[in-house]
Amino acid sequence: MRFVTWLLSTAAGVAVATWLISGIYLTGPHTGQAELKHKLLPLLLVALILGLVSSFVKPVVTFFSIPFIIFTIGLFLLVINALMLMLTASIAGGLGIGFHVQGFWNALWGSIVITVVNWFIDVAVLEDDDRRPGSRSRARSRSRSRQGQG
């Protein structure tokens, strides 16, 4: 369930980025039901590619960029996120998915938008799951507190 929620929230972030930033777009119809039908699967595939890139490539790039990250007080992480989005667009283009990012600045703003949307969905949806009665994380915290009392 967590994977599906993550995939949908990343796809929503990519969708918002394509809507807000003219240099990030999916090819195909631009209005109506045809747009939704044509772009839903590509959005999910782009979200999956972005997740794979962020899981496997980003840690290596981040590790080798530690001096730049320290020197820029962490701002270089924005550059890394933008480069990961550009790499995602390149991979998607190679696979025939019509996802395009035109230029570094569009990628930078797009990565910020995707991060903010993911954060918002994570706080609004996923954290709400933790507050429900009987949720696993609440049960775990109760059992931990009981063990400490003992």
Image (cartoon, rainbow, N blue to C red):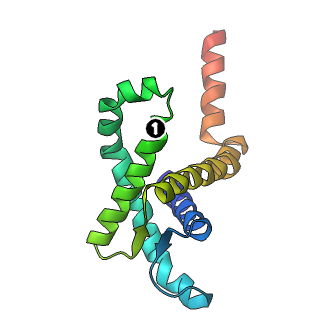
Total tally of numbered discs in the picture: 1
- The kind of secondary structure element at disc 1 is helix
Query: Which residue appears at 54% of the width and 90% of the height?
Result: 34
Query: Which residue appears at 66% of the width and 50% of the height?
Result: 120
109 with respect to 127 (left or right): left
Give the percent coordinates (x, y) of residue 102.
43, 66
101 with respect to 128 (left or right): left
Query: Which residue appears at 49% of the width and 30% of the height?
Result: 74
Q: Amino acid at mark 1?
A: Leu
Quadrant in the picture for the C terminus: top right
Residue matched to label 1: 77
Give the percent coordinates (x, y) of residue 148.
62, 12
Q: Which residue is farthest top? A: 150
Give the percent coordinates (x, y) of residue 90.
31, 64
Counting other residues with Cα less than 10 Å from the Cα at mark 1, is it few (<14), some (14-19), or many (20 or more)? some
91 with respect to 21 (left or right): left
Q: Which of the pair 117/62 is nearer the observer?
A: 62
Q: Would you place residue 126 above or below residue 71 in this image?
A: below
Q: Which residue is farthest left? A: 94
Query: Which residue appears at 50% of the width and 52% of the height?
Result: 108
